[in-house]
Image (cartoon, grey):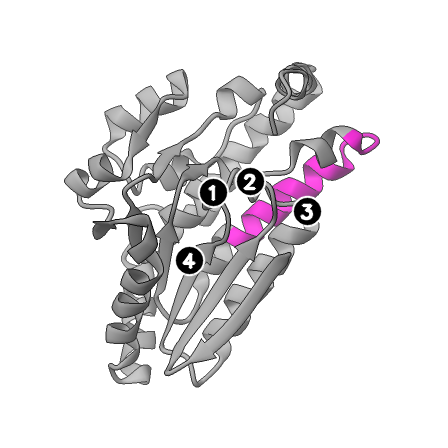
Amino acid sequence: MGVSTTTRDGVAEIVVDAPPVNALTVAGWHALAGAVLAAGRDPRVGAVVLRAEGPGFNAGVDIKEMQRAEGHTALVGANRGCFAAFAAVYDCEVPVVAAVNGHCLGGGVGLAGNADIVVASEDAYFGLPEVDRGALGAATHLARLVPQHLMRAMVYTCRTVTAAELHHHGSVLEVVPADGLRAAALEVAAAIAAKDRYVIRRAKESLNGIDPVDVRRSYRYEQGFTFELNLVGAGDEHRDAFLGEGAG
């Protein structure tokens, strides 16, 4: 359980395993950030595969942890942890291939949206349930996966989209059967890792440098509204309702 890394033939495979739905605690988000950055700094590594065990890629933050904590300590921790993990994927010195299965919600969209390449299983779906949780955030990253008007509709309505829809938009490279997801992601990563390591690292750096949106600043701006929603009580109200439904 947790975050593990194995490296073989120039590819670092980072696996998240946090049952039952891969909703990460504050410590989990920071552990993931550390693992991704460490993999990128490893001179043996030419590409990273980020994937998860279990029924889904990522369900966002651990709301139970947040509601158990006194005051806003867990909220601040979760916001800082998500910021660190999303930034780590973006700032990783080598390309990151996200292998997305099942649900990719909230924080999962932050990870996939900041990845360099997304490969998804046929059962994968993506969404931001933040409005229904009294929060905001990761629209920055969703906007890297879908067109602007669809992004807005998804934020306002909390609707989800399938991997096939994202493949249509060009943001998912391949959609494969669930039992072939890991192999497909590793194949893409291996093709990258076979390139000149110095050149690939400069390619990643150069592509980040020409991005039209500063994803760190943009996401931090979104997070400010989550803090406002908590100050007025909307955050606790919606999180408590969510937990009361027996979810999470």
Question: How far apart are the two marked residues, 3 and 1, measured between alpha carbons?
Answer: 21 Å
Q: Nearer the viewer, residue 171 or 102?
A: 102
Image quadrant of residue 62? top right
Image quadrant of residue 139? top left
Label 2 secondary element: loop
The image position of residue 34, as x and y in percent, is 59, 64
Amino acid at pointer 4: Tyr
* Residues at circles 3 and 2 in contact by the CB criterion of under 8 Å: no
Tag 2 or tag 3, which sits nearer the N-term?
Answer: 2
Amino acid at pointer 1: Pro
Q: Is residue 233 left or right of residue 165?
A: right
Residue occupying image coordinates x 59% and y 41%: 20
Amino acid at pointer 3: Val
Tag 1 or tag 4, which sits nearer the N-term?
Answer: 1
Tag 3 or tag 4, which sits nearer the N-term?
Answer: 3
Q: Which mark is residue 224?
A: none
* Label 4 sits on residue: 90
Question: How far apart are the two marked residues, 2 and 1, measured between alpha carbons?
Answer: 7 Å
Amino acid at pointer 2: Val
45, above or below 134, in the image? below
Question: How far apart are the two marked residues, 3 and 2, measured between alpha carbons?
Answer: 15 Å
195, above or below 132, in the image? below
Q: Which mark is residue 55?
A: 1
* Label 2 sits on residue: 21
**Mark 3, residues whose alpha carbon is within 10 Å: few (<14), some, or many (≥20)?**
many
The image position of residue 113, as x and y in percent, is 37, 46
* Label 3 sits on residue: 26
Q: Nearer the viewer, residue 2 or 221?
A: 2
